[in-house]
């Protein structure tokens, strides 16, 4: 903070602000341009979002998709475990909003710095590496399956990819994929083809 700036200082910072606005105007021209390097390599530039409401800004800025949808907002902004329908509506809103561009959703990542009042977790020496994220989901398949079913249902409205956080072993990955397949099989009994996209 500059207290009682001189006119020269005011002019200097006004010039910086003007220069930045000119840069922003130039960047805005490139929003829908492909992300290609000088040597012809294509790069995907994806947005990270925390809620479905963030999708509008991602689209406005020309994102090629959502590279990380942090789903824990559904749990942290609630006083209860969100239902399948509550989650489905949130994921659907994001998927529809991206207009056919892919949305990568990270499954529940709580524990460590993200506790839930209504889901007490054991105290640990290092909660950032211990009982959290995928390990909670595998230990509580009721919570995990609710989320996976909502994601599979939302995939009918556009491309959805699922990221399992904090995988430490091949066994955890296989177990998570097996639970995903159970959810898909259950949903396909009533809705053949659901989750095939």
Image (spheres, rainbow, N blue to C red):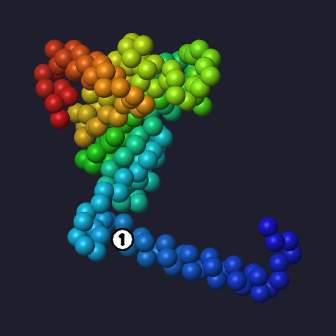
Q: Secondary structure at mark 1?
A: loop
Q: Residue at x 77, y 87 (%)?
A: 8
Most extreme residue toward the bottom, as rendered?
A: 8
Q: Residue at x 80, y 85 (%)?
A: 7
Tell me if 21 is positioned left or right of 30 in this view: right
Within 10 Å of disc 1 (Cα), the crowding (few <14, some 14-19, many 20+) is few
Q: In the figure, 67 relative to 123: above or below?
A: below
Q: Nearer the viewer, residue 142 or 91?
A: 142
Q: Nearer the viewer, residue 54 or 40?
A: 40
Most extreme residue toward the left, as rendered?
A: 192
Q: Residue at x 75, y 81 (%)?
A: 10
Whether residue 21 is visible here, answered yes or no, is yes
Q: Quadrant of the C terminus?
A: top left
Q: Quadrant of the N terminus?
A: bottom right
Q: In the figure, 42 relative to 197: above or below?
A: below
Image quarter of residue 78 = top right
Image quarter of residue 27 = bottom left
Whether residue 87 is visible here, answered yes or no, is no
- Mark 1 = which residue? 30
Most extreme residue toward the right, as rendered?
A: 4
Q: Position of residue 135 (x, y in %)?
A: 43, 20
């Amino acid at each position: 903070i500059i207290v009682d700036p001189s006119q020269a200082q005011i002019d200097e910072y006004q010039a910086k602000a003007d220069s930045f606005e000119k840069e922003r105007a130039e960047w805005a021209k490139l929003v829908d341009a492909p992300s290609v390097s000088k040597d012809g390599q294509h790069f995907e530039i994806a947005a990270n979002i925390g809620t479905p409401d963030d999708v509008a800004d991602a689209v406005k800025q020309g994102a090629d998709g959502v590279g990380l949808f942090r789903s824990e907002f559904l749990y942290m902004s609630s006083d209860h475990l969100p239902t399948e329908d509550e989650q489905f509506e949130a994921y659907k809103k994001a998927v529809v909003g991206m207009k056919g561009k892919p949305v990568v959703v990270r499954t529940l990542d709580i524990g460590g710095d993200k506790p839930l009042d209504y889901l007490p977790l054991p105290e640990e020496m290092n909660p950032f590496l211990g009982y959290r994220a995928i390990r909670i989901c595998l230990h509580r398949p009721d919570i995990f399956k609710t989320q996976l079913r909502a994601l599979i249902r939302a995939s009918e409205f556009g491309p959805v990819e699922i990221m399992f956080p904090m995988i430490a072993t091949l066994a955890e990955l296989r177990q998570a994929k097996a639970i995903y397949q159970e959810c898909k099989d259950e949903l396909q009994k009533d809705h053949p083809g659901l989750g095939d996209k």
